Image (spheres, helix red, strand yellow):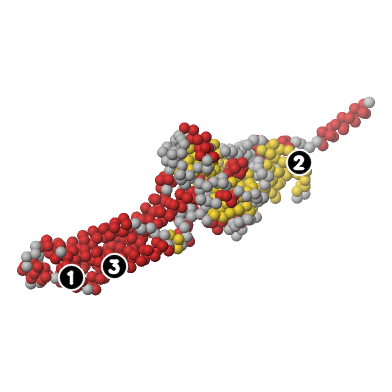
Amino acid sequence: MLALKLAYRNIKGAGLRTWLNVAVLSLAYVLIIWHQGIFTGMLKHGSQAVIEDEIAGGQYWHKNYDPFDPLSYDESHGPIPAELAGLIKDKKATPILIRQAAIYPEGRIQTVLLKGIEPGQTILGIPSAGLDKEEDALPVLIGRRMAKSTSLGIGDYLTIRWRDVQGTFDAVEGKIVEIMNTKVPTMDKGQLWVPLEELQKMTGMKDEATIIVVGQNVQGQGDVSPHQSFWCGDVSDWKFKDQNFLLTDINEMVRSKRISAGILYVILLFLAMLAIFDTQVLSIFKRRKEIGTLIALGMTRRQVISLFTLEGAMHGILAVGVAAIYGIPWIIFYSKRGMKIPQATEEYGFALAGRLYPSYSVGLVLGTVLIVMATVTIVSYLPTRKISKMKPTEALKGKIS
Amino acid sequence: MRKLVLFILLISCSFLYGQEPSGKTILEKVDANYIAENRKVISTMVIKGRRSTRTLQAQSWIRGINKAFTEYLSPAREKGTKMLKLGDKLWIYSPSTDRIIKIAGHMLKRSVMGSDLSYEDYMEDPKLSNMYNAELAREENINGRDCYVLELSAKKEGIAYYRRKMWVDKERFLPLKEELFAKSGKLLKRLVINEVFKVGKRWYPKKMVFKDVLKKGAGTEFIIDYIEFDVKIPEYIFSKASLRR
């Protein structure tokens, strides 16, 4: 307790030097927590958007389907298996047929993915009901990003050209009936959504699909348990991919962003630690007589080292208080109001809304405080090792042996 | 009596002489004009885009209907780019990256060097009588030349263009105009031959314009600078190794 009082009095006495250190340290606390909160928010909201609009409770993929291999698209289609047909009928799953096609916006050829979906489905959060309209051309739903890149608007016509199951070219006029505002770029960019039945007819792939998306609440429904098996009976041509698998990319992306942000934290902490290290070295040099007196009065070298280390570590404790004064309102403000995301961020292919809401947890705050405190304590201790080599008589004279 | 028999014979002969050939016969004659065992071609491709025009020159070696090797000679940017077609497979070599890429799937839909011709068009079986039933629809005159108008419909499933319309010169059996349709009947591409020339006993297109009608622009012009039929082509030309040579 005496050491604590002494330490507090000493760092208070150091005046501006202490507050400068505290200010830098508090900035490190706030920036690290705020930045990490952004990534957590990114992951939380991104995953939520992907689950709502793209993957729901998981997906059955046709055995040849590989979303990262466009060469696989031609062969990745097959009859909807009997076991999943029941789920589809009960509106607990929805099939999607994916084919490659070409469109000609403004007279330029552009390769797109033609995706057939049931207009009445409710598994995915996209406004597919808009496709259930009687039109003089094939009704087409596109995303906001696609509409922007192709300069297409509601009511516009476009020529769609594709090859049927045998490889023969076919072409039809499509009409944009709806533009959706999905947060998920992989449901939007380079894609046209059309009624499933129409696409099956157009391509000669009656009752076929490429993927089957199951609802979020289908666990334990009937024999098809999407969270357990990969291969099951009649659906041997269909591989089940659960949410964890389908969210791997988003998790990896956030992880890599966290790692790259770590460089910033290291620089911030390095600056703060440099200041504390310098302060400690200076403090020991300036207080040689005091160290000698304390030892002469009966304090062991270990106690003196502890006192100086405590002084250094106390910067970290004070910084927590200062950070709380301006950091908590700052963090609350951003978590409530969110941050406007620059338009260029959409090009990263990350599922984000117009505003990003950082997300904080007790674990994140405590973890950050602990890491910074541990670092401050270690850095505070390192210069004090010199004290153990001091001779009290020399120290009393103001000399360092 | 003898005069009557002679008259009937004369009438029959004139009827037979005046009878139009069938669509199939015309198409076979068109194929005969185009197909050769081996040929070497130097051609110029003028790609007329919306903003600019690009000119490329290429040298090709073609064997039958299944093997073709093309090397771009100019401009400097494309010089050394090579394409190899072996049956239904296509590879392209880019000297700038020193890589051989197999063109398949969605890449086949892309245009060849920004032209109106896609890799899929390049891959097509050039022997039309193998793929289409031809019907003689009528006769028309194009640029002062009498033509048969043939309506072609696919013999089997899987032919890229389900229907074609072809204006074939009655005398030279060379198509002067061709329209390619989708299954739905929508016109997709148009080929117009503006100039022809005689090589040995065959008539061959000299200048033609290929136009993807769904795309903006004036189309792509092909000019045959040099063509030689039945030349000797070493077998190694049609190998993947020759792409890097």
Judge left or right: residue A280 versus residue B118.
left
Label 3 sits on a secondary structure element that is helix
Q: Quadrant of residue A232?
A: top left
Chain of the residue where label 3 is placed in the rendered structure = A
Q: Quadrant of residue A291?
A: bottom left
> What residue type is disc 2 on?
Ala
- Rendered residue at 24%/73% (across/down): A16
Residue ID for mark 3: A322
Q: Can residue A276 be seen in the rendering of this structure?
A: yes
Find residue A9 and report its horizontal and vertical position in percent: 18, 70
User: Share a chain, discs 2 and 1?
Assistant: no
Q: Are marks 2 and 1 in contact (CB under 8 Å)?
A: no
> Which residue in the rendered view is the most extreme toward the right?
B1
Find residue A5 and report its horizontal and vertical position in percent: 16, 67
The local crowd at label 2, few if under 14, some if 14 to 19, many if 20 or more residues have their Cα within 10 Å, is some
Find residue B43 and report its horizontal and vertical position in percent: 61, 48
- Rendered residue at 62%/50% (across/down): A133
How far apart, in angstroms, are the residues tagged by discs 1 and 3? Answer: 18 Å
The local crowd at label 3, few if under 14, some if 14 to 19, many if 20 or more residues have their Cα within 10 Å, is many
> What residue type is disc 1 on?
Arg
- Rendered residue at 47%/50% (across/down): A52
Give B70 or A127, whichever is nearer the viewer: A127
How far apart, in angstroms, are the residues tagged by discs 3 and 2? Answer: 91 Å
Give A80 or B178, whichever is nearer the viewer: A80
Label 1 sits on a secondary structure element that is helix
Residue ID for mark 2: B137
Chain of the residue where label 2 is placed in the rendered structure = B
- Quadrant of the frame with the N terminus of chain A: bottom left
Please give the label number shown on residue A9: 1
The local crowd at label 1, few if under 14, some if 14 to 19, many if 20 or more residues have their Cα within 10 Å, is few
Judge left or right: residue B129 versus residue A315.
right
